[in-house]
Amino acid sequence: MNADISNVLDELENQSRLEKARKVDVAPQDRMLAITKETGEFLNMILRLKNAKNVLEVGMSVGYSTIWIAEAIIEKSGKIFTIEKNPDKIKRAMDNFAKAKIEKVIEIKEGIAMTILKELSAQEKNQNFFDMVLIDADKENIIEYFDLILPMVMPGGVIITDNMLHPEKYRQDMKKFSDYLKSNPDLRTTTSNIGNGEEITIKIK
Ligand SMILES: C[S@@+](CC[C@H](N)C(=O)[O-])C[C@H]1O[C@@H](n2cnc3c(N)ncnc32)[C@H](O)[C@@H]1O
């Protein structure tokens, strides 16, 4: 991995550690709430194994997960569409992307996930388009997000959902989500204990 990217990842991991240990005073809406490093490595490996180019991310925050994704697709002229509603986090993410020199592969969609997903899914060119999707925003609407996302994933594409097991407060909703996925015969899905618990879902057809 090149030094520009690994330096920014190191900085963000350090910040995330301090936030989780409550060693810095950060307002709830400004917290990174990032995936773990282990999950970042896992996403990066899946993207490389799939030779992936086009990725959709729901919930960018300050861009930690986006950087792990970008690192895997940048040499393939890939593209990440990433959704975030918080303008301050978007500014911080843009600084991080500039420092990591990966801006050219990232298109930030500022706004509410449901609205943006409806817009994206209404466009013909996005049907069966994405190799991978990361779902990591609010959990209340997760089934609706998934239903909008699924037609945009190419057959054989992967959908990763964070926070299946941690924090505990989401566990019941996430179990319902996982059961919903399991009821669809066109999907294969499993809940792994990587990071905060990652649901790994493959669209078979
Ligand atoms: C868990 S964090 C994402 C962390 C990021 N994926 C990472 O690992 O670095 C969730 C983000 O989703 C954003 N978010 C939550 N609900 C949203 C919504 N309805 N529309 C758009 N963004 C939303 C929050 O502002 C927050 O930054």
Image (cartoon, rainbow, N blue to C red):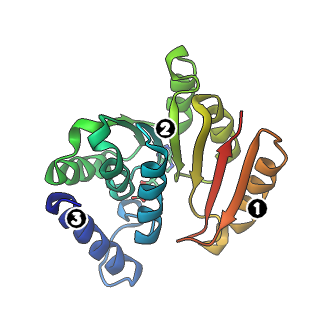
Q: Is residue 2 left or right of residue 70?
A: left
- Does residue 96 appear in the picture of this structure? yes
Question: Please, what is the three-letter code of the amino acid marked with disc 1?
Answer: Lys
The image quadrant where one finds the C terminus is top right
Is 204 rendered above or below residue 126?
A: below
Q: Position of residue 178 (x, y in %)?
A: 75, 56
Q: Position of residue 164 (x, y in %)?
A: 64, 64
For the point 47% across and 62% down, the residue is: 42
Q: Which mark is residue 175?
A: 1
For the point 28% across and 43% down, the residue is: 74
For the point 47% across and 65% down, the residue is: 39
- Confirm or deny contact between disc 2 and disc 1 (CB under 8 A): no
Looking at the image, the residue that sits furthest to the top is: 124
Which comes before the other along the chain, label 2 or label 1? 2
| Count of all numbered marks drawn on residues in the image | 3
Q: Position of residue 173 (x, y in %)?
A: 73, 59
Front: mark 2 or 1: 1
Question: Dot 2 surroundings within 10 Å: few (below 14), some, or many (20 or more)?
Answer: some
Front: mark 2 or 3: 3
Question: Please, what is the three-letter code of the amino acid marked with disc 2?
Answer: Ile
Mark 3 lies on residue: 6
- Confirm or deny contact between disc 3 and disc 1 (CB under 8 A): no
State how far apart marks 3 and 1 are (Cα): 34 Å
Q: Which mark is residue 112?
A: 2
Front: mark 3 or 1: 3
